[in-house]
Image: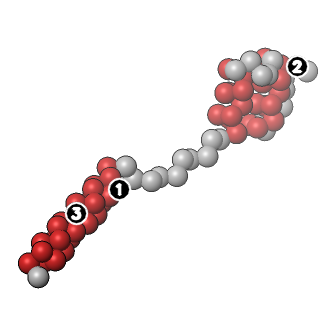
Amino acid sequence: MWFSGKVLWMAAVWVGVIVLAIWVAVLLFPRMPAAPASPRAILQARYARGELTRVQYEETLSALTGRKEEGR
């Protein structure tokens, strides 16, 4: 009888340690969804990677901001 009592206490201690570790991990590393990138940020990243020419970048930027191109 004393053996099963010790085993139950030891199991309860280990379960408590595991639950405490999970609780601490959740507090330290909260799950926050990443904010979606704005269209302008995506455009700037594509231009920085060389996927767009300067003309394409400026045309798309003017379309995003709603400005008309001057002199063209």
Q: Is residue 50 above or below residue 33?
A: above
Q: Which circle marks residue 14 in the picture?
A: 3
**What residue is shown with label 1?**
26
**What residue is shown with label 2?**
71
Q: Which residue is drawn at the image coordinates 76% and 30% (left, top)? A: 61
Q: Position of residue 18 (x, y in %)?
A: 28, 60
Q: Quadrant of the C terminus?
A: top right
Of marks 3 and 1, which one's residue comes earlier in the chain?
3
Towards the viewer: 34 or 53: 34
Q: Is residue 12 above or below residue 68?
A: below
Q: Which residue is drawn at the image coordinates 45% and 53% (left, top)? A: 31
Evaluate whether residue 51 shows in this view: yes
Q: Position of residue 52 (x, y in %)?
A: 79, 22
Q: Classify mark 2: helix, strand or loop.
A: loop
Q: Which residue is drawn at the image coordinates 35% and 56% (left, top)? A: 26
Q: Is residue 7 left or right of residue 71?
A: left
Q: Is residue 21 left or right of residue 72?
A: left
Evaluate whether residue 27 shows in this view: no
Of marks 2 and 3, which one's residue comes earlier in the chain?
3
Image quadrant in which you'd find residue 50: top right
Q: Classify mark 1: helix, strand or loop.
A: helix
Towards the viewer: 43 or 69: 43
Query: Is disc 1 surrounded by few (<14), some (14 to 19) or many (20+) residues within 10 Å?
Result: few
Q: Is residue 53 above or below residue 10?
A: above
Q: Classify mark 3: helix, strand or loop.
A: helix
Image quadrant in which you'd find residue 41: top right
Of marks 2 and 1, which one's residue comes earlier in the chain?
1
Q: Position of residue 60 (x, y in %)?
A: 80, 31
